[in-house]
């Protein structure tokens, strides 16, 4: 991580392949989003470090991201944790030269790689948030998934109000471990999803499931198997979490509906492609399936810009 501490603000020195505006477009894809806000080209995000709630204002001036603290500057230890979180959120450790070299030769990705140059996977650094968000999204449309997330966050998350705006944190697994299935049913979660989420919260509270333990596994297949042993986590959810939280660029949520729609639109197909057809399109994506998927997802939001 390459950053400079100015005490009242931070600067993160960016890799060459980075485009803040492209990342903002993806982050702004739903007006129901409750965990960050975009205003006048800046991103506002509440982060919790050592029991402190820290409001960050994130902007970009090439070649840096500038992180300001509208309320007050936290301690040096907290500033370091904030820098680490934002660095991971924007996937800034990832070296993308190989992806762009591959994409420039690929008939599906070539135009997307040029169009969205500098876009990075917008990650979910917190494992509990990544797992719960993936489970919420199972077998429902994205709009209703965001509705569930908003209810869940506003019911169980911590918040901070500044200049009339309220900023929210995703609920902690400790908090969710202590609630009941009926509590989530009242928010319109299915019984199954409520059970899955509470069970995961309990497993994380006991220390049986942690991000560190998953990252100690020797390869992606082991991580996927470990995740899929958890009730409620199938292949799609495991791949999504590996892609968005664990930074596995070879993760490939091949059954993803958004991926299928994006390929249909991009290739002007009469119907959504089959899994076998997607495997053919993806034959050259080895090692970069997660980035290929993310760029295809990004293409779905062009109509809204």
Image (cartoon, rainbow, N blue to C red):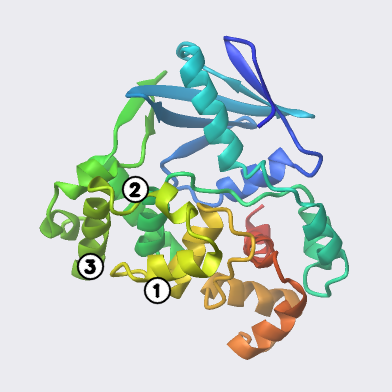
Q: Which of marks 3 and 2 is nearer the N terminus?
A: 2
Q: How many marks?
A: 3
Residue 228, quarter of the rendered image: bottom left
The reply to whether callout 3 and callout 2 are in contact (CB within 8 Å) is no
Identify which residue is drawn at 66% across, 68% down: 289
Q: Which of marks 2 and 1 is nearer the N terminus?
A: 2
Q: Position of residue 250 (x, y in %)?
A: 63, 65
- In the drawing, what numbered circle is on residue 190? 3
Q: Nearer the viewer, residue 225 or 135?
A: 225
- In the drawing, what numbered circle is on residue 234? 1
| Real-space Cα separation, disc 3 to disc 1, in angstroms | 17 Å
Identify which residue is drawn at 63% across, 56% down: 304
Q: How packed is label 3: few (under 14 Cα within 10 Å), some, or many (20 or more)?
A: some
Tell me the SS state at disc 2: helix
Q: In this view, does 152 lie to the left or right of 214?
A: left
> Relative to 178, does residue 265 appear above or below in the rendering?
below
> Relative to 82, does residue 106 appear above or below in the rendering?
below
Q: Which of 212 and 3 is in front in this view?
A: 212
**Is residue 188 in view?**
no
């Amino acid at each position: 991580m390459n950053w400079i501490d100015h005490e009242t603000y931070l600067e993160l020195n960016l890799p060459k392949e980075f485009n803040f505006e492209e990342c903002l477009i993806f982050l702004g894809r739903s007006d129901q989003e409750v965990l960050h806000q975009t205003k006048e080209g800046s991103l506002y995000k509440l982060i919790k470090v050592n029991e402190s709630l820290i409001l960050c204002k994130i902007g970009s001036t090439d070649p840096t991201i500038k992180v300001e603290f509208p309320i007050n500057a936290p301690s040096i230890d907290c500033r370091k944790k904030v820098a680490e979180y934002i660095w991971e959120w924007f996937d800034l450790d990832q070296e993308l030269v190989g992806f762009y070299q591959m994409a420039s030769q690929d008939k599906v990705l070539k135009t997307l790689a040029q169009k969205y140059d500098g876009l990075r996977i917008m990650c979910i650094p917190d494992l509990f948030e990544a797992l719960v968000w993936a489970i919420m999204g199972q077998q429902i449309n994205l709009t209703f998934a965001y509705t569930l997330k908003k209810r869940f966050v506003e019911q169980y998350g911590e918040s901070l109000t500044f200049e009339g705006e309220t900023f929210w944190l995703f609920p902690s697994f400790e908090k969710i471990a202590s609630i009941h299935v009926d509590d989530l049913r009242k928010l319109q979660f299915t019984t199954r999803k409520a059970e899955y989420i509470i069970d995961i919260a309990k497993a994380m509270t006991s220390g049986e499931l942690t991000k560190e333990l998953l990252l100690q596994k020797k390869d992606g297949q082991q991580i996927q198997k470990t995740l899929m042993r958890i009730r409620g986590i199938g292949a799609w959810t495991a791949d999504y979490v590996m892609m968005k939280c664990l930074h596995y660029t070879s993760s490939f949520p091949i059954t993803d509906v958004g991926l299928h729609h994006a390929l249909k639109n991009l290739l002007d197909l009469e119907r959504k492609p089959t899994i076998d057809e997607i495997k053919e399109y993806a034959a050259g994506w080895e090692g970069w399936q997660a980035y290929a998927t993310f760029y295809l997802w990004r293409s779905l939001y062009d109509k809204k810009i």
